[in-house]
C-alpha cells in the first residue's frame, strides 16, 4: 500500500478540492432537499477526509485503491446520516464512520477466524453503535450498546474484543495534515472514556480556529501546566493580558465543540 500514491481509483488526489465552510453549508442544504448533484459535489469535496483516514491503515497488506473505495462508502453513509441540527462538525461525525467501514472490510477479509455466533454479536454491536452515534452525535459506551441489544455488557465487550486487530500505541487514529491523534493518547490514563477519542477530534478542530498567540498560550497553560504569571513572563505581556486572551480563546473554542 503506497500512502503517497497520487492517483487512487482514477482520482488525482493532488487536485482534490477543499470546500469552504459556507460551501459545505450551501451544499448540505441542497442535499436535504434531494439535490443529487449537490450530494455528488459534497462527496467529492470531502475525499481528502477519506485520504486522511486511510493513512492509519498503512502496512496492512491491502491495496490502497480498495481501502479508499471502502472509505468512500463510509463517507457516503456519514453524509446520508448526518444531522446538522446537533451542531457537530461533519468531519467529527464522519471520521469514525469511515474508520468503522474500513475496519469491517478488513475483518471480513481477515485470515484469523472468529466463531460465527461471536462474530454475529460483534456485528450487531457495531450496528447498534452506528445507530446510537447517529442518534446522539457521539460514540456510545459499551453499557449503552449492551442495553440497546439487551445483552450483558461482558458478552458485548468479549465479542468486540474478539474481532479487533492488534495495533501499535503509536498508530495515528486521525490526521488532518497538522497534529495527529495517536492510540496512546486515548489509553494513557484511566480518565479516558469511550467518547474521549471523538472529543479529541473536536478539540483539535476547535484549536485550529485560534490564532498562533492563543494556541501558544493554551499550550503553555494546559499542556505544559504553567501559571498565568509564568506564561506572561515567557511571552512578554502582563498577567491580565494572558487572562483575557485565555478566556477569549476558550470562549471561541466552545463554539466548535458539540
Image (cartoon, rainbow, N blue to C red):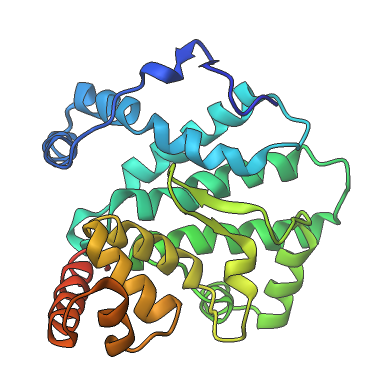
The quarter of the picture where residue 216 lies is: bottom left
Front residue of 122 and 232: 232
Q: Quadrant of the C terminus?
A: bottom left
Q: Residue at x 35, y 80 (%)?
A: 221
Is residue 200 shown left or right of residue 68? left
Image location (x, y in percent) of residue 107: 73, 45
Is residue 19 shown left or right of residue 70? left
Q: Is residue 74 above or below residue 180?
A: above
Q: Residue at x 60, y 52 (%)?
A: 172
> How many callouts does the rendering have?
0
Front residue of 185 and 102: 185
Q: Is residue 231 above or below residue 135?
A: below
Image location (x, y in percent) of residue 45: 30, 29
Front residue of 214 and 27: 214
Q: Residue at x 61, y 21 (%)?
A: 65
Q: Is residue 183 above or below residue 37?
A: below
Amino acid at each position: 500500500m503506497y500512502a503517497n500514491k497520487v492517483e487512487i481509483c482514477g482520482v488525482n488526489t493532488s487536485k482534490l478540492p477543499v470546500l469552504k465552510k459556507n460551501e459545505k453549508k450551501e451544499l448540505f442544504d441542497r442535499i436535504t432537499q434531494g439535490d443529487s448533484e449537490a450530494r455528488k459535489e459534497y462527496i467529492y469535496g470531502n475525499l481528502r477526509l477519506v485520504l486522511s483516514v486511510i493513512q492509519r491503515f498503512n502496512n496492512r497488506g491491502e491495496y490502497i485503491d480498495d481501502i479508499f473505495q471502502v472509505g468512500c462508502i463510509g463517507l457516503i453513509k456519514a453524509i446520508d446520516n448526518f444531522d446538522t441540527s446537533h451542531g457537530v462538525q461533519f468531519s467529527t461525525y464522519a471520521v469514525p464512520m469511515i474508520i468503522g467501514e474500513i475496519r469491517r472490510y478488513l475483518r471480513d477479509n481477515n485470515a484469523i477466524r472468529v466463531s460465527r455466533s461471536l462474530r454475529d454479536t460483534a456485528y450487531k454491536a457495531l450496528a447498534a453503535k452506528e445507530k446510537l452515534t447517529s442518534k446522539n452525535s457521539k460514540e456510545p459506551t459499551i453499557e449503552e450498546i449492551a442495553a440497546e441489544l439487551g445483552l450483558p455488557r461482558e458478552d458485548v465487550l468479549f465479542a468486540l474484543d474478539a474481532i479487533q486487530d492488534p495495533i501499535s500505541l503509536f498508530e495515528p487514529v486521525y490526521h488532518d495534515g497538522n497534529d495527529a491523534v495517536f492510540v496512546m493518547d486515548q489509553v494513557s490514563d484511566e480518565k479516558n472514556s469511550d467518547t474521549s477519542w471523538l472529543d479529541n477530534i473536536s478539540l483539535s478542530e476547535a484549536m485550529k480556529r485560534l490564532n498562533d498567540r492563543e494556541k501558544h498560550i493554551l499550550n503553555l497553560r494546559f499542556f505544559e501546566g504553567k501559571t498565568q504569571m509564568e506564561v506572561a513572563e515567557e511571552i512578554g505581556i502582563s498577567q491580565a493580558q494572558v487572562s483575557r486572551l485565555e478566556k477569549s480563546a476558550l470562549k471561541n473554542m466552545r463554539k466548535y465543540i458539540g
